Image (cartoon, rainbow, N blue to C red):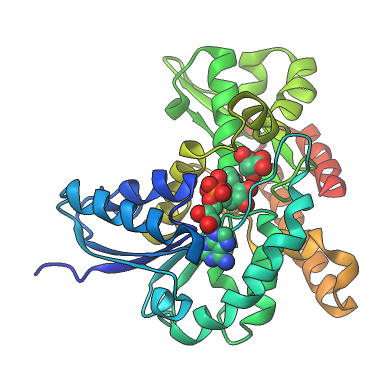
Amino acid sequence: MAKQPTRVLVTGAAGQIGYALVPMIARGAMLGLDQPVIIHMLDIEPAAESLKGVKMELIDAAFPLLKDVVATTDVVEACKGVNVAVMVGGFPRKEGMERKDVMTKNVSIYKAQASALEQHAAPDCKVLVVANPANTNALILKEFAPSFPAKNITCLTRLDHNRALGQVSEKLNVHVGDVKNVTIWGNHSSTQYPDVNHATVKTAAGEKPVRELVANDQWLNTEFITTVQQRGAAIIKARKLSSALSAASSACDHIRDWVLGTPKVKYHPFLLLTLIKMGHLLTTILSVMPRLPFRILLTSIKCMSFLYWAKFLLHVLFRGHGFQWGSILMDLMAFQLV
Ligand SMILES: NC(=O)c1ccc[n+]([C@@H]2O[C@H](COP(=O)([O-])OP(=O)(O)OC[C@H]3O[C@@H](n4cnc5c(N)ncnc54)[C@H](O)[C@@H]3O)[C@@H](O)[C@H]2O)c1
Ligand SMILES: O=C(O)C[C@H](O)C(=O)O
């Protein structure tokens, strides 16, 4: 029997990420090559003409999986029945700004759109916030859509994860698909901590730790980290526009792994929770600690300690499989940084 189409909302669809993202969704890069989709595109009135143009192009591309397109400036119409919502609408930072500098402009958008999502999206709708500051906007959505399942509100840090994979693959001259188990701790900002302590590379002689292959702790502990942390700014400097195709592609990766699952991890299934970083609400909670009631803070810290104790146990159980005691300390230091 033919699959029912999945309705995917893209806000800010007339913008540069939106323009890169909608054809990816229509081609099956987000939900699979056998999943029909209906794309809902939302933008604001000044971008209405441009949004119409994007709709025309989607139709002209004759994507077999694309069953319908809704292009609107009405947030209620845009949110109706959507199963996946990719929230890109908002303003990008300019050169010399930090991501948090667009907070005043963008947070109000998320406050306004939360209740439309809460009231009109499908009850199990999966939400990915892309617009910056992504973690904070996700928290705002959650606060202003209280009946929406909090576990379904995430933000995009998969781009940072992919950037870390890219840096390692360039350094070692290996294919990016052969690099695994990189982790990003913290939120999508310049304080994030890219961690390769469990990362491996598939070689002819089997899986090898990234640290062993790079054999340059100085690079891994300094330049690698700052390159990933500052990659967004470097792209803005080079393009005079913020990242778009990599952001769109990472948004597809994020939703695809969420909806369709990730491949099984050998030896340490627990790390599934941390390897594919989804900027889940936990990190959001940590990133805005001072604003939150003490009880929530305590719960999230307890949660984090649980994660670390579980990880510690895995180190003990599987140290014969390449785990290093030193990396626990590194992780604890990373925890201090988030
Ligand atoms: N999390 C990440 O990894 C990541 C990566 C790249 C960019 N970003 C962020 O994504 C956002 C979008 O980037 P872009 O390059 O596509 O920007 P852009 O300016 O090209 O597009 C943004 C679009 O959002 C629209 N918009 C503004 N207010 C809106 C509203 N209330 N409702 C619906 N649409 C609205 C604008 O009209 C515009 O078409 C920025 O905040 C950027 O910083 C995040
Ligand atoms: O850096 C930015 O402002 C855009 C985006 O968050 C990115 O990381 O590319």
Q: In the shown orientation, is residue 171 left or right of residue 233?
A: left
Instruction: Report the residue at 44% width, 47% height from top.
Output: 253
In which quadrant is the N terminus drawn? bottom left
Observer-nearest of 119 and 192: 119
Q: Is residue 157 visible?
A: no
Instruction: Identify the residue at image location x=80%, y=16%.
Output: 218
The x and y percentages for residue 70 are: 31, 68
In percent of width and height, residue 99 lies at 73, 47
In this picture, is 266 found above or below 214? below
Picture coordinates of residue 179, whole percent (x, y): 51, 28
Q: Quadrant of residue 78?
A: bottom left
Taking 212 as reference, is 264 above or below it?
Answer: below
Residue at position x 63%, y 70% in the image:
110
Residue 40 is drawn in which quadrant? bottom left
Specify whether 20 is left or right of 188. left
- Number of callouts: 0
In the image: residue 296, left or right of residue 212? right
Q: Residue at x 39, y 79 (%)?
A: 77
Q: Residue furthest left?
A: 1
Question: Please, is residue 156 above or below residue 147 in the view?
Answer: above
Q: Of residues 309 and 43, which is closer to you in this image?
A: 43
Give how far across and how far down residue 295 sits, in percent. Answer: 85, 79
The quarter of the image that holds ligand 2 is: top right
Q: Is residue 251 visible?
A: yes
